[in-house]
Amino acid sequence: MELESIIERMAEEQGLVLVAVEQGPGFLRVFVDGDRGVSVEECAALSRRLERFLDKGYPIQGPYTLEVSSPGLDRELKTRREMVWAIGKRVRAVTRGGRVLSGRLISVSDEEINLEGEVLGMRDLARLNLAEVDT
């Protein structure tokens, strides 16, 4: 079973949602969230659980540092998983041309995102092609 799937299952068992996993030389970072945010205690509990699992022999090359935290309010959404996690949340999108749009993320597809916001006092829907969004 893939490590990300294992982490996702462990997070769900704690009532958390896996937002992202970043792995590189010497580190494994796990970002989780919950319906009401995520506490330091919840992150620590998941970290201890993951550490026990990894110490039992899951193949990670060489020494590593494990970090478990919340994604934070200003997190840049890089992957589709992160964008799906953000549906219903307020986000800010910056286009390659420098245009900044803010609003509630209402949908994500392979090609575009849809934001709902207030423009000139009226409710407005902005459709952005993902190729136009600066990452």
Image (spheres, grey):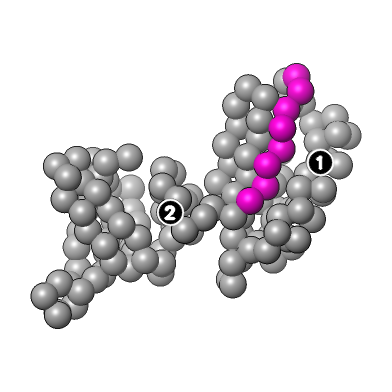
Q: Kindly identify the residue that appears in the image at 71 percent across and 38 percent down.
A: 66
Q: Is residue 64 magenta?
A: yes
**Quarter residue 26 falls in:** top right
- Judge whether 23 appears above or below 17 on screen: above
Residues in magenta, as a range: 62-69
Q: Kindly identify the residue that appears in the image at 64 percent across and 63 percent down.
A: 38
Q: Is residue 10 magenta?
A: no
- The x, y position of residue 127, in whole percent, is 20, 59
Q: Amino acid at mark 1?
A: Glu
Secondary structure at badge 2 equals loop
Residue position marked by numbered label 2 in the rendering: 74
33 vs 74, left or right, is: right
103 vs 8, left or right, is: left
81 vs 65, left or right, is: left
For label 2, the crowd category at 10 Å Cα-Cα, with few meaning under 14, some 14 to 19 and many 20 or more, is: few
Residue 51's label in the rendered image is: 1
85 vs 12, left or right, is: left
Q: 115 and 38: which one is in front?
A: 38
